[in-house]
Amino acid sequence: MSADSPAAKALNCPKCGAPLTVRSFDHAVTIVCGSCGSILDAKDPALKILQEFEAKTRAVEPLIPLGTRGTMPDGPYEVIGLQQRTITVEGADYSWHEYLLFNPFKGFRYLTQYDGHWNDARPLRSLPAAVLGTRQRVSLDGVTYKHFQTAEARTTFVLGEFPWEVRVGEIALVSDYVAPPRLLSREATGNEATWSIGEYIPGRIVWEAFGLPGQPPRPVGVYANQPSPFRSLATTWRSFAVMAAVGLVLMIGMALSSLNAKVFERTYTFDARPQQAEREPSFVTDVFELKGHTSNVELTTRASVDNSWLVVNYALINQDTGQAYDFGREVSWYHGRDEDGDWSEGSSQDVAIIPSVPPGRYYLRVEPDTAPDRGAVRYNILVKRDVPRFLFYGVALLALAIPPAVATWRSLKFEHARWAEGGGAAPDIGSAA
């Protein structure tokens, strides 16, 4: 407050004689004695007792002591009152605190606190409008708020002074509508209804504003209008879409620039029966040329296997340098029928990829093998050069999708936690009352 602010007025409690300080001057309607808890009529020169402290009412220690001054976004304010309010849901009580702030030139505003979650609230100057066709939404300044909860709130503790007549045990029907980080609250008592708007603020901002010692209480759970930490979800997915599109363009470019050329194909027959054992199973193919730059070689083996197998040991050999690429492949296909129905396993075709093979003249050394009792097996060998491969694109796409997918899952989990706390039917507010 500025140095020329009006001075606070000092009085004494008629119940216990404790000194009282009136900070909101003529605005005060009731004042609560901090010593005995009596609620007094601030407009009565004799401070008539309106309600005496009940022993069963548990005193609340304010997180922001009354009389503390701090700086809010629109100027300095002083904490002059504390009201604890409680709702009962399925037999369990949930309480929150409302700190009344006062500036002699700007009036009143509130800081509400529940489980470490804070809101900076003020009375509404203009009323929200009901969204046509639903009682679950209201609109204010072009923003639509969704009904969160309606419940009866009881005043269970008061301290300080208030610009209205306050009572412990007083009941109001409170309805909350959220559009994070803002919250609209409608409070109805009898035929009267008032609206306020709050904005979620971190506890550290409150602590800094009022110069409080230590650290604010850690927030517990997700609050009604708590902003989601995943608000940039759309940006994350847009970034994924851009990177996926770039990858798709690169994949198409690679496919168009690849040779994908067939350089060799032959069909052979292998017979492993004992009478054929004197025949050497291994052989070499004709020479074929691998053109272009260093790239992959795709070798496809197709075999006439039927409840049988064929194993082929290959060596791709450079005729000029002798460099060899050794690998073995198996083609097997089994099928049948059992109590669960038809089944099959394996395939009559196998594909092998040899990466980064330099250009040159090559041939294959081939050594087949199969079960001796299976007779002759026909198999085809197809060799292609510089074949476009799309698996890496799928893997990259999957890897790129993981961060936004995880963020989406966490966002859904966050929103589920938010709305799990809500409940109660929205009131019929007409146009806005």
Image (spheres, rainbow, N blue to C red):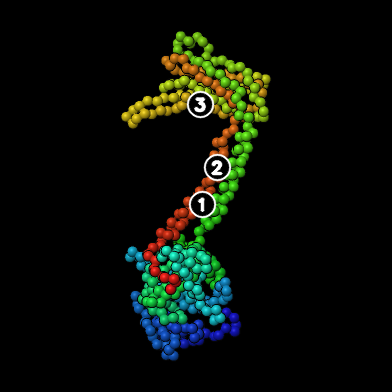
Whether 379 is drawn above or below 135: the answer is: above
Residue 99 at x, y percent in the picture: 47, 74
Identify which residue, 37 or 92, lies in the foreground: 92
The quadrant of the rendering that contains the N terminus is bottom right
For label 3, the crowd category at 10 Å Cα-Cα, with few meaning under 14, some 14 to 19 and many 20 or more, is some
Residue 376 at x, y percent in the picture: 46, 15
- Residue contact between numbered discs 2 and 3, judged by CB atoms under 8 Å: no
Q: Amino acid at mark 3?
A: Asp
Identify which residue, 375 or 20, lies in the foreground: 375
Residue 79 at x, y percent in the picture: 50, 76
The residue under the point 46% across, 73% down is 195
> What secondary structure is found at the residue carrying circle 2?
helix
Q: Earlier in the sequence, mark 2 or mark 3?
A: 3
Q: CA distance from mark 1 to mark 2?
A: 16 Å
> What secondary structure is found at the residue carrying circle 3?
strand
Q: Amino acid at mark 1?
A: Ala
> What secondary structure is found at the residue carrying circle 1?
helix
- Visible residue check, residue 146: yes
The quadrant of the rendering that contains the C terminus is bottom left
Q: Earlier in the sequence, mark 3 or mark 1?
A: 3
Residue ID for mark 1: 407
Q: Amino acid at mark 2?
A: Leu
Residue ID for mark 3: 350
Residue ID for mark 2: 397
Nearer the camera: disc 1 or disc 2: 2
The answer to which quarter of the image holds residue 77 is bottom right
